[in-house]
Amino acid sequence: PYCARVRSKLTDLGITYINVNVPRSKADRAELLEVSGQVGVPTLVTEEGQIIADDDDAIIAYLDKNYATK
């Protein structure tokens, strides 16, 4: 449900994004570990290379701050 919240926010804001499904088992998430340094989801890698990992509330706050029209 945490990933779904982030995808919904991205869609609501009209942001084009790439959704990468990772294995259910944390032990099998080598690529995610390499990219972000951790294995939790959801993980957002911004265009600037900032990584927000394993925190849907922080990701949504970032999206609202940087992409929501005021």
Image (cartoon, helix red, strand yellow):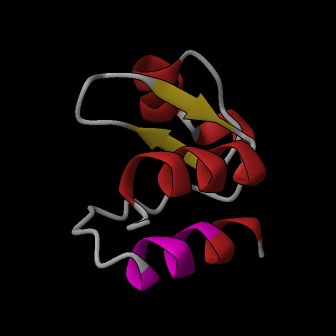
Q: Where is residue 66 in the image (x, y as percent from the top left)?
A: 41, 46
Question: Does 27 sit above or below residue 64?
Answer: above
Residue 62, image x and y in percent? 55, 44
| 47, 2: nearer the viewer | 47
Is residue 2 rendered to the left or right of residue 64?
right
Residue at screen point 25% across, 24% down: 48
Q: Does the magenta stretch include residue 66?
A: no
* Above or below: residue 31 compared with residue 62: above
Give the left or right position of residue 44, taking residue 45 as reference. Answer: right
Q: Residue 56: x and y, percent?
A: 72, 53
**Residue at far front of view:** 70
Magenta portion: prevailing SS class: helix
Quadrant housing residue 47: top left
Q: Find the magenta span and give its range.
A: 6-12
At a point 72% along the width and 40% down the height, the residue shown is: 54
The residue at the point 62 percent across, 56 percent down is 60
Residue under the point 27% across and 61% down = 18
